[in-house]
Image (cartoon, grey):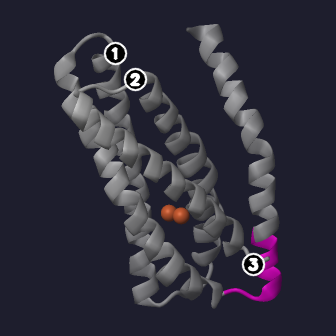
Amino acid sequence: MQARGPLMIEHRLIESMIAVIQRKLERAAQTQSIDPCFVDAAVDFIRVYADRTHHGKEEDILFRELRKKSMSADHQRIMDELIEEHVFGRQTTKALVEANTRYRKGDASALAEVTAGLRTLVGFYPKHIKKEDVMFFPAALAYFTENEDQAMLAEFWELDRKMIHEKYRAVAKGFNTG
Ligand SMILES: [Fe+2]
Ligand SMILES: [Fe+2]
C-alpha cells in the first residue's frame, strides 16, 4: 500500500460521518432542536479521528517530510492552504463546543450557532478532502522514493497504534480532574 492509502481510506469514513451530520441538520431544521449528545459525538469524531488521527498523519508526517523536499511554488501554496484549512476546522469545532455547552444549559438561541458550526464542517470537509485526494496526494507522491513512501506508511501505523491509548488517557484524566 502507498502511504496515501490510509489517508484516503480515512477520508471515506470522514465523508460518511459528514453525511450523518448532514441528515441530523435536516432533522434539526424540522424540529428546531438538536440532541447535544449527538453534537458531542460529532465533535469527538472530528477532534480525535479527523483532526488528531488523520490531520496528525498529514501535518506531523507527510507535510514534515515534504518540507525536506524542494517543492514547486504551486505545491507549497496548496500545502499552506491545507494547513490553514486544518486550523479553520479546529476553530470551527471550538466555537461549536462552546455553542453546544450554552445550548445544553438551556440557551435556545445557541441552536443557530450549533447548526451553523455543523453546517460549516459539512461544507468544509468534502472540499478539503477532494483537494487532497485529487490534487495534493498525487503531486506529493512524486517527491518520494518507494522507500521514503513506505517509511511514512510505517509511521502512520505507529501513530494509529498510539492513538487509542492517547484517547482514553484523556478520557480518564477528564474524569479525574472534573
Ligand atoms: Fe487535510
Ligand atoms: Fe485529509
Density class for disc 3 (Cα within 10 Å; few <14, some 14-19, many ≥20) is few
Residue beneath label 3, please? 2
The residues tagged by marks 1 and 2 sit, at their Cα atoms, a distance apart of 6 Å
Name the quadrant of the C terminus.
top right
The three-letter code of the residue at mark 3 reads Gln
Task: State left or right for residue 86 relative to residue 110.
Answer: right
**Near-viewer residue (118 or 150):** 118
Density class for disc 1 (Cα within 10 Å; few <14, some 14-19, many ≥20) is some
Q: Is 145 one of the magenta-colored residues?
A: yes
Density class for disc 2 (Cα within 10 Å; few <14, some 14-19, many ≥20) is some
Total tally of numbered discs in the picture: 3
**Mark 2: secondary structure:** helix
Q: Is 44 one of the magenta-colored residues?
A: no
Q: Where is residue 98 in the image (x, y as percent from the top left)?
A: 33, 26
Residue at the location (55% across, 50% down)?
50
Most extreme residue toward the left is 109
The picture quadrant where one finds residue 148 is bottom right
Of callouts 3 and 1, the N-terminal one:
3
Residue 104's tag is 1
**What segment is highlighted magenta in the picture?**
144-152
The residues tagged by marks 2 and 3 sit, at their Cα atoms, a distance apart of 39 Å
Residue at the location (23% across, 34% down)?
30
Of callouts 1 and 2, the N-terminal one:
2
Q: Relative to residue 14, is residue 2 depicted above or below?
A: below
Residue beneath label 2, please? 36
Q: Where is residue 94 in the image (x, y as percent from the top left)?
A: 37, 36
Residue 113 showing in the rendered view: no
Residue 36 showing in the rendered view: yes
Pointers 2 and 3 in contact (CB under 8 A)? no
Magenta region, main secondary structure: helix
Residue at the location (28% across, 19% down)?
103
